[in-house]
Amino acid sequence: MVKIYAFFAVTFLLMPAFASAQAFKRDSTVKDTARKPLPRYNIREEVRIYGETPEQRRLRQLTKTFNATDDVLEQVEGVSMMRRANFALEPTIRGYNAGQVAVVIDGMKMHSACVDRMDPVTAYIEIENLKQLDVSKGASDFNYAQTLGGVMNFITTKPDFTRPFAAVAETGFEAVSNLWRVRGEANIAPEWLQDGENSGIAARMSLSVKRSGDYYAGNRTLIPRSNFDKENFKLDITKRFDEHHSLNASAIIDFARNIGYPGLIMDTKETRSYIWSIDYKAQNLLRSVPLLTAKLYMNQVLHWMDDYRRTQQEIRERVVMPDMYMPMYGDNRTTGFLGEALLTDGAQTLKLTADVFQLNAFADMAMVSIFPDVAPMYLLNVGDVWKWNYALAAEWFRPLDDNLSLRVNVRADYSDRDIFDTFAKQQFEGYWGDRPTRSQLFAVSASAAVQWQATDETALNLRFARASRMPTHIETNGYYLYNPSDNAIYIGNNLLQPERAWQAELAATFTQEAVSMRLTGFANWLDNYIAGLTFIAANPSNRLFSQAFRRYDHVGQAFIGGVEASGRAALTESLELRGTLTWQQGRAIDLQDWLPFMPPLQGTLRVQWHGEVSIFGETLPVWSEVGTRFAAAQNQPSAKLLFEDATPAWIIGDVRFGATLFGRCDVRFGMENVLDTFYHEHFAINNLPSRGRNIYVNVAWRF
């Protein structure tokens, strides 16, 4: 209890000192009237989705072809999606996954409640919530986390004071799973009747409903138990006190149920998430302090899963805990404070961040025999774990001359974690004896990047980093966690130290009006890679627990390296070609094994046309796109860290079309996986097939 009070005391003490700006966007330029303007402050790669600037509106009309957040993530170079179902795909970056990648919402920490990772954070954000997706790869951005793989920041849309009333209503259908969806958005900024000026209050709301049946893989192969139902609601209310100060209250509520996971032994009965935040923002209070923000937030994820929909034959014949149903429950609550300050003297900028959060995690399961005369059993997977995390970060940017700039990023974290459930402590003592349950960790990361504008068209960017990432609460305090990828039971280890890596990256960019290209090479050397090590061998004679028991541990050195290439060419004023290509390898050096979940050579190619057509004397904006995604075979599977198998090569094609009718009605339709190819990606758990031919249509009306 003392720690809880201390947490809130620190929160309110830090608020006035470390309140700061929202994430400083890549294309923003800080100017000081008394000095020369700063050059562009390039801090990360962004994938813009929603926005209200003219350019963002054009992108929405011409290139916004996404139906879900998962579709967006699949378009990002270097990002692959881990598939367990037709729902809630989990993103990986350059082969890093789970706790090695930080996923935040408006900078806020959030944690999955399911110990089987059936509910990644990305599952609770819908595309209508989003303004943009901010992706940084590798250890290039420490503002929101200690990370090795990178950060995904889902930046949500806030109320617009320039639009007294605006609304969008949309409906859509996808044939591959008989999915129906309805979504809507509304923005209200009321005016005073006497003078027509804004009242200083604006609100924005979005709502979506999805109903999906079982999906078909290629060759019209039905994947049973892959249906889901889902609703998402978001509300923001902003009060602007004057031109400098504003306060925003935000709520995101997401419900899902009846979710089938054919790639796992369990399904999700229901999941709920509640995300609350209050943001204070101050702009241009002083010439040297252009932005300040402070955010208090709280979120909770509740997750119920069971196997009652599975046939009794499946329950009896499965490899883990046969003859038993296993209903499971998870509850994760995160409370935090995020304060940022952007400082400038006109020649350089300094961004300071105070990041404090507290996690309380609980997960348990019952083992209920199919035979009525067998008594049920009970165990804890995560036994009332509390984690307190305190961090300070700084990002300094300075132009060295007209063509050379330097950016330095540093972050320091202190983490204090313990378990408080009596039964969980007994489980802990059964494995570790009288070892203390409390663990305290400290981690520091730093990176430096130099950008050289060699010519007007060519730029080089060189980055070095010494990065850390804290082990997750699952890795330190999880128990009896079944992993279907290697058919093993995992145990946490509270003596784990932060995973650390040296990273180097060199990127070359060539940009002209009609052509742009980017080539990036990266290399990561990990000192103490965290993975499962077997401490109890598999016992096939034990029918109930034949699996090996593995505990999270440091397995020695590892290496990850690769190359990414992307390009764009304007073939004509209305025709554009875009493509990406990535290749990488990962190796556990001490174990002489390939790292798991390493993507093979893969890429995309898209040709898009946009223009106007005349129908019955009316000119209509239209666009069309032909694209392909492909991957080579992955013949370097992990054999020790995880028991992977090789993945065959695959290629699929898509066609998409869109038009704007009557100036208000946006129509999109298309066909994905045109040839109905049967395939699975290397990240599919238990080789779950990807979706087959999908014909979809969306109709949106803007008010």
Image: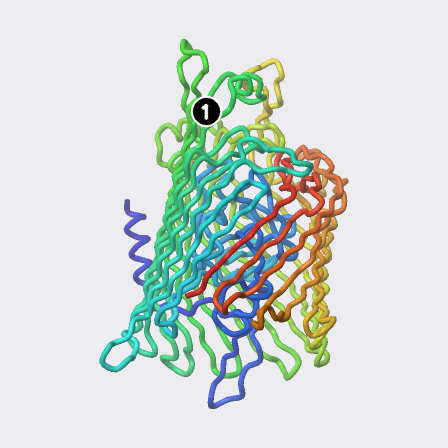
Farthest residue toward the bottom? Answer: 34
Q: Is residue 641 left or right of residue 310?
A: right
Q: Where is residue 423? Give x, y as percent.
A: 37, 27
Quadrant of the rendered image containing residue 547: top right
Placement of the C terminus among the 4 image quadrants: bottom left
In the picture shown, does residue 171 fall above or below 641?
below
Look at mark 1 in the image and give the residue it sits on: 308
- When the figure is inspected, residue 63 is found, relative to residue 161, above or below; the finding is above
Farthest residue in the left direction?
194
- Res 387 visible: yes
Tell me residue 162's x, y (percent). 38, 74
Residue drawn at 50 percent across, 68 percent down:
662
Residue 555 placed where, x, y %? 64, 39
Mark 1: secondary structure: loop
Q: By what rule are the colours in the image chosen?
A: rainbow
Residue 125 percent location from the top left of the image: 46, 52
User: From where the camera sits, is residue 385 visible?
Assistant: no
Q: Nearer the viewer, residue 159 or 410?
A: 159
Q: Is residue 51 left or right of residue 204?
A: right
Q: Quadrant of the N terminus?
A: top left
Q: Which one is nearer the viewer's eye here, 265 or 310? A: 310
The residue most toward the front is: 616
- Three-letter code for the amino acid on which mark 1 is drawn: Tyr
